[in-house]
C-alpha cells in the first residue's frame, strides 16, 4: 500500500506504547485509527493525548476473547466503515520459565501474545479480503522472537510463534493484495518496560550475570515508540516483511 491517506487501521494494544506510536504515525499519514485495548487506564490516558482528533476511535477489547475482539472489529466498521490495516500488537510480559511447574501463567501469556495475533488475524483479515481494496497486516513479535530471553520462556515461545504464523500468513495472502509484516522491536520506552532512573541493585552486584548487564544496557538505549510507528509506516509502503527497529 503506497498511499495510506484515508485508510483505516485497527490496532490491538493501541492505547499505549508501540500501539499508540503506530497510531500517531498513521494519523500523520492521514489515516483513521481504531485503538482496541483492555486497559481503561491506558485508554483514558491515550484519549487525553489524542483529544479532539475525530480520526481516532477507542474500543475496549481483550484480544484473548474472540467474541469480544469480533465485537470491537464490528464497532470499528460501524464508525469508519472499513478496515485496511490490522496491527496485532497487544502483548504482556510474564508467563514464567520453561520448566517451572506453573501452567496457568504460561497459558495466560500464550493466550494474549500468540492467541491475540491468531484471533485478530482470523477475525479481521476476512473483512479486509471481502472489501477487495488490498490491505496490510502487522504482527508484533520481539527480539525475544529471534533470540530467546532467559526467564521469559512463555514470552519467547509466543514471539517465535508469531514470526512463524506471520511468515505463513504472508505466503497465503501474497496473491490477494494484502501485505504482511512482522515487527521485531528491541527495547522501546513503553509501559511494558518501565525504566527506573538508577540501575537496580542486582545489576550493580559483583558477579551479576553478564546477560542481565547486557539487557540493562539495551534498555538504556530504548527508543521512542513513535519512531517504531514511523518504521512500520515505511515497511507497509515498501511491503517489507521484516521490521527491526533498534538497529536500523
Ligand atoms: P504497553 O504495555 O505500553 O502496551 C501494550 C498494550 O496492550 C497496553 O495498552 C495493554 O493494555 C494492551 N493489552 C495487553 N493485553 C491485552 C489484551 N489481552 N487485550 C487487549 N489489550 C491488551 O507495551 P508495549 O511495549 O507497547 O508492547 C506492545 C507490543 O510490543 C507487545 O506485543 C510487546 O510484546 C512488544 N514488544 C515490546 C518491546 C518493548 O521494549 N517495549 C520489545 C519487544 C516487543
Image (tube, helix red, strand yellow):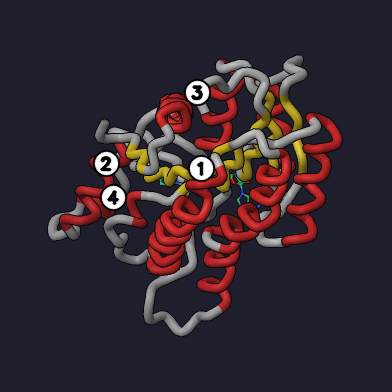
Mark 4 surroundings within 10 Å by alpha-carbon count, few (fewer than 14), some (14 through 19), many (20 or more): few
Residue 4 in view, yes or no: yes
Residue 201, numbered label: 4
Q: Is residue 114 above or below residue 3?
A: below
Image quadrant of residue 109?
bottom right
Q: Left or right: where does residue 188 sit relative to residue 78?
A: left
- Name the mark nearer the viewer: 2 or 3: 3
**Nearest to N terminus: mark 4 or mark 1:** 1
Q: CA distance from mark 4 to mark 1?
A: 37 Å
Q: Look at 72% across and 61% down and name the residue there.
A: 65
Mark 3 surroundings within 10 Å by alpha-carbon count, few (fewer than 14), some (14 through 19), many (20 or more): few
Image x and y of residue 161, in percent: 43, 63
**Nearest to N terminus: mark 2 or mark 3:** 3
Residue 2, numbered label: 3
Q: CA distance from mark 4 to mark 2?
A: 17 Å
Q: Is residue 19 above or below residue 145?
A: above
**Nearest to N terminus: mark 4 or mark 2:** 4
Q: Nearer the viewer, residue 206 or 180?
A: 180
Disc 2 designates what residue?
218
Image x and y of residue 38, in percent: 70, 48
Amino acid at each position: 500500500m503506497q498511499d495510506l491517506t484515508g485508510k483505516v487501521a485497527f490496532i490491538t494494544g493501541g492505547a499505549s506504547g508501540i500501539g499508540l506510536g503506530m497510531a500517531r504515525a498513521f494519523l500523520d499519514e492521514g489515516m483513521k485509527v481504531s485503538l482496541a485495548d483492555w486497559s481503561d487506564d491506558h485508554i483514558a490516558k491515550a484519549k487525553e493525548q489524542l483529544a479532539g482528533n475525530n480520526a481516532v476511535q477507542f474500543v475496549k477489547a481483550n484480544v484473548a476473547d474472540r467474541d469480544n475482539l469480533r465485537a470491537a472489529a464490528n464497532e470499528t466498521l460501524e464508525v469508519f466503515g472499513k478496515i485496511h490495516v490490522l496491527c496485532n500488537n497487544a502483548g504482556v510480559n510474564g508467563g514464567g520459565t520453561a520448566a517451572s511447574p506453573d501452567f496457568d501463567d504460561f497459558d495466560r501469556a500464550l493466550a494474549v501474545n500468540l492467541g491475540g495475533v491468531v484471533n485478530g488475524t482470523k477475525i479481521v483479515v476476512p473483512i479486509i479480503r471481502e472489501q477487495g481494496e488490498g490491505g496490510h497486516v502487522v504482527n508484533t513479535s520481539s527480539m525475544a522472537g529471534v533470540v530467546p530471553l532467559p526467564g521469559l520462556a512463555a514470552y519467547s515461545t509466543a514471539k517465535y510463534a508469531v514470526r512463524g504464523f506471520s511468515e505463513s500468513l504472508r505466503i497465503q495472502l501474497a496473491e490477494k493484495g494484502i501485505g504482511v509484516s512482522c515487527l521485531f522491536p528491541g527495547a522501546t520506552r513503553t509501559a511494558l518496560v518501565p525504566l527506573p532512573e538508577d540501575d537496580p541493585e542486582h545489576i550493580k552486584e559483583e558477579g551479576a550475570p553478564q546477560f542481565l548487564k547486557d539487557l540493562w544496557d539495551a534498555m538504556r538505549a530504548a527508543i521512542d515508540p513513535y519512531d517504531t510507528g514511523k518504521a512500520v509506516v515505511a515497511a507497509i509502503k515498501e511491503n517489507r516483511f521484516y521490521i527491526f527497529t533498534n538497529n536500523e
